[in-house]
Amino acid sequence: MKNYLTFVGGKYYLSRGWEDFKESFDTREEAKKFVEKLVTGEYEWGQVIFIGDDIGEELVTEFYYPDRHFNYETKEWYGPIWTDSTD
């Protein structure tokens, strides 16, 4: 299995786990392009998880939201967006 795992789904729900897994990739860019392509079509959300090369690396999760969202602080619409687990 490669370091970047991709997951997509029709709606966000808890506890589906590996049932939403699609494919793994060598690079973050490949994984994100794959997710964006699928989410633009039949799915509503996507996720990329970096599992690292060794036990010392931090696990990073990025979520892709294709819909537009409203920022109440700036009073502006934005999207689609990627957010990571540190946001």
Image (spheres, rainbow, N blue to C red):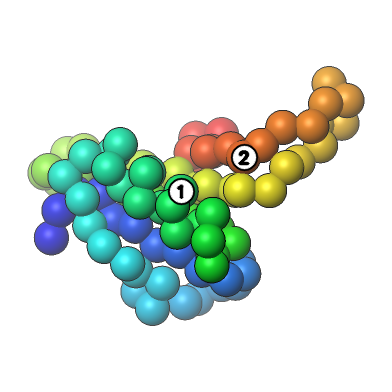
Could you tell whether 55 is left or right of 16 in the image?
Answer: left
Q: Which residue is mark 1?
A: 36
Pointers 1 and 2 in contact (CB under 8 A)? yes
Task: Identify the secondary structure beneath mark 1.
Answer: helix
Q: Tag 2: Cα neighbours inside 10 Å, few (<14), some, or many (≥20)?
A: few
Quadrant the C terminus occupies: top right
Q: Which residue is mark 2?
A: 80
Q: Residue at x 22, y 57 (%)?
A: 24
Q: Residue at x 27, y 43 (%)?
A: 30
Q: CA distance from mark 1 to mark 2?
A: 10 Å
In depth, the one of 71 and 31 nearer the eye is 31
Q: Residue at x 40, y 62 (%)?
A: 7
Residue 27 falls in image quadrant: top left
Residue projecting furthest to the top: 74
Residue 54 falls in image quadrant: top left
Q: Earlier in the sequence, mark 1 or mark 2?
A: 1
